[in-house]
C-alpha cells in the first residue's frame, strides 16, 4: 500500500512548488515545540492552536521512486506532521483538550444544520 501526500506551502505570490511525498515517515523530531493555528478541510471553518515539534526530519520517496531525507521547520514542519497524521487517521482536533474539541464539533454540527436548512 502506498501512502501519498501532495502539499504546497509556497506563498500565494510565488510560483507553486508542490511537494510530492510517497510513504513519508518522520525519522526524528525536535524536543523544542511550536504552536500554529491549524485548520483542515475535514473540519471546515474551524481553527485551533496546536503544539507540535518545531523541527522534524522526514524520509520519503518521490514520484520516480527515489528516496529522500529532508529537515523542516516552521510552517513546512507543521504541515508535514499534519498531513502524515491524516494518513494515520489523526485530525488536528485530536491534539486539543476534550472541552476545545467538543466546542469545535458543536460549531461544525451547527454549521451543517444551517447549510441544510438554507
Image (cartoon, rainbow, N blue to C red):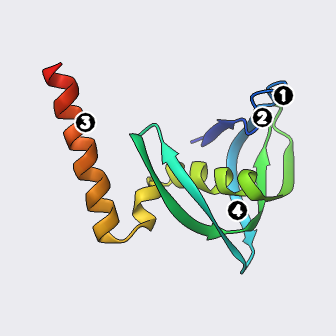
Q: Is residue 43 visible?
A: no
C-alpha span from label 1 to label 2: 5 Å
- Whichever of callouts 4 and 2 sits on the residue coming sooner in the sequence is 2
Image-based side of 70 in relation to 18, left or right = right
Residue picked out by circle 1: 14
C-alpha span from label 3 to label 2: 29 Å
Residue picked out by circle 4: 26
**Image quadrant where residue 51 sits:** bottom right
The quadrant the N terminus occupies is top right
Q: Secondary structure at mark 1?
A: loop
Residue 93 on image: x %, y %: 41, 58
Contact, CB < 8 Å: mark 1 with mark 2? yes
- Whichever of callouts 3 and 2 sits on the residue coming sooner in the sequence is 2
Q: Secondary structure at mark 2?
A: loop
Residue 98 on image: x %, y %: 30, 70
Q: Secondary structure at mark 3?
A: helix
**Image quadrant where residue 113 sits:** top left
C-alpha span from label 1 to label 3: 33 Å
Q: Residue furthest top?
A: 118
- Whichever of callouts 1 and 3 sits on the residue coming sooner in the sequence is 1
Closer to us: mark 4 or mark 2?
Answer: 2
Residue picked out by circle 2: 11
Q: Is residue 107 visible?
A: yes
Tell me if residue 23 comes above or below residue 98 in the rendering: above
Amino acid at each position: 500500500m502506498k501512502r501519498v501526500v501532495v502539499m504546497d506551502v509556497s506563498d500565494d505570490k510565488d510560483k507553486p512548488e508542490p511537494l510530492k511525498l510517497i510513504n513519508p515517515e518522520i525519522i526524528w523530531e525536535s524536543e523544542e515545540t511550536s504552536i500554529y493555528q491549524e485548520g483542515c478541510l475535514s473540519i471546515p471553518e474551524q481553527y485551533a492552536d496546536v503544539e507540535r515539534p518545531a523541527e522534524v526530519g522526514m524520509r520519503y520517496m518521490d514520484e520516480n521512486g527515489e528516496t529522500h531525507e529532508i529537515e523542516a521547520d516552521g510552517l513546512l514542519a507543521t504541515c508535514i506532521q499534519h498531513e502524515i497524521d491524516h494518513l494515520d487517521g489523526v485530525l488536528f482536533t485530536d491534539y486539543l483538550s476534550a472541552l476545545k474539541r467538543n466546542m469545535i464539533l458543536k460549531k461544525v454540527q451547527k454549521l451543517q444544520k444551517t447549510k441544510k436548512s438554507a
